Image (spheres, rainbow, N blue to C red):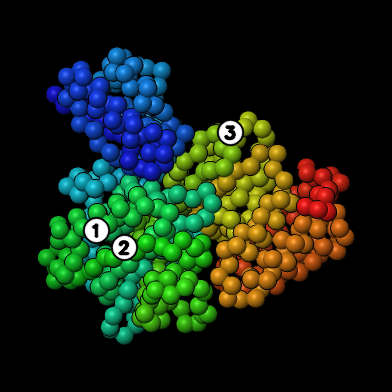
Amino acid sequence: MTVVVYVPRDSAARSVGADAVAKAIAVQADARGVAVKIVRNGSRGMFWLEPLVEVETGTGRVAYGPVASGDVAALFDAGFLTGAAHALALGPTEEIPYLKNQERLTFARVGVIDPLDLASLSALGGLDGLKAALAMDGEAICAAITESGLRGRGGAGFPAGIKWKTVHDQPTGRKYICCNADEGDSGTFADRMIMEGDPFTLIEGMAIAGLAVGAEDGYVYIRSEYPDAIETMSAAADLMEQAGWLGADIGGSGRSFHLHIRRGAGAYICGEESSMLESLEGKRGTVRAKPPIPAIHGLFGKPTVVNNVLTLATVPVILAKGADYYKGFGMGRSRGTKPFQLAGNIRQGGLVEKAFGITLRQLVEEFGGGTASGRPFRAAQIGGPLGAYVNDAMLDIETDYENLAAAQAMLGHGGIVVFDDSVDMAAMARFAFEFCEIESCGKCTPCRIGAVRGKETVEKIQRGENVAANLELVGDLCETMRDGSLCAMGGLTPMPVLSAMRLFPEDFDPLHSKSGPLMAAE
């Protein structure tokens, strides 16, 4: 009897030795004359347990982790191939509280399947959404997405169905679907996990989008720092085309959709949709002035749907199970689920997919287990390097777009980076300006110059120079950047700066800050 053992091929797991563990299992099995089939699945998203090894038993999968290659012989000795007890045993995988307490819709198959085994998809609902879409016209598909309440998961939260309908309503002709997979925000990795762990669901979502708006070509723009994702997506696209689910005749329907994988240019600004389009066209990644919007004048001047990975990867479950099913999750105008990513100084970093409405405290304390250092929590930055900071008093906010906006914060891509009480928030404000200075495309003055002057002014505050006047000046600079920048790069940089100043004013008092007055020479 052959025992199936799962060892993740996810790049996060590989970075901590998953390949060596898989090799050690193969060596031990061969030496002991045991028949073992090793499946390289995606990650379950519990990164503190990686490499996480799972064994298929008669009662389901049993997990062990974190497993090092040196642990493998002892696992065999203990009988782990039958799910036996061991110091690294975690019990049935699906019963691990971190995983059991989630609502996985977009990530339902991530960590469960071999990401390049197309044959295994049907048993787990793969391609059901695409098959449903092939029986519908474009307007009906757009209506279903609108009815579901799906909003863009890239940060802005714009209703996906309205964007699609805008492109659908443009005159017949060449149109495009562009997936923005330039996941550059600090503390985010959900896009990468999808592309490495279940690429078929993203491809399926893009094909559905193409059917909805009448686009026959789609582009996935993947950041250059994700070589494994690029390789996996390219292989998955080839498999889909060979199986007849991409190309000139999708599923024998006579309708076509061709997918192209493109490596990003290595610039944070290319995560902004118009900069990404410029890069796809072979130009330098700089922001376009709007209007016109990409839905009317996008890639190569044609109507274009631009969505991020999580938005498009969520589409198949909506078409497969219906809009009512999906909007049954969430709260208010934020329907469905949101993949949150826990990072920074946190004990249990990883991915949590939950319906909108879970509190930040539940995410940080219950799922995340508090700070990794054991020191008191002080702050978390939500929504990437341009997102606002929150303090402990704000952790009971229910996470939806409107609640966070009311608290002068944003959900963004769902990254949550945690800091303990040793963090210097004046230094973090300075970093926000410096990040903008480095990553700005330079096209507009408020962003290009404002970030430099902002960094210099915060440094003066840290040195104790005219603190009150310089704090006021930072506020003025932030207002100019927010109101005058062409895109969110400069427009959102004030968010972390102002939230740090508002919530942690003591760190901007050089006499009482953690670092004390900086020397003028610095």
How far, Cα to Cα, is label 3 from label 2?
Answer: 37 Å
394 versus 37 height, above or below: below
Q: Are marks 3 and 2 in contact (CB under 8 Å)?
A: no
Label placed on residue 200: none
Mark 3 vs mark 2, foreground winner is 2
Residue at 65% across / 49% down in the picture? Answer: 390
- According to the picture, the residue beneath numbered tag 1 turns out to be 237
Instruction: Kindly identify which residue carries mark 3.
Output: 372
List x then y, in percent, for residue 162: 41, 72
Q: Amino acid at mark 3?
A: Ala
Q: Residues within 10 Å of mark 2 (few under 14, many from 20)?
A: some
The vertical placement of 199 against 50, above or below, is below
Is residue 295 visible to the viewer in this orientation of the structure?
no
* Residue at horizontal 72 percent and vertical 64 percent from the top: 454
- Circle 2 sits in a helix, a strand or a loop, which is it? strand
The picture places residue 17, in percent across and down from the top left corner, at 39, 33
Earlier sequence position, callout 1 versus callout 2: 1
In x, y percent, where is residue 485? 62, 73
Neighbour tally class for label 3: few under 14, some 14-19, many 20 plus, Cα within 10 Å: some
* Residue 237 screen position, x and y as percent: 24, 58
Question: What residue did someone put label 2 on?
Answer: 261
**C-alpha separation, residue under disc 1 versus residue under disc 3:** 39 Å
Identify whether 290 is placed above or below 368.
Answer: below
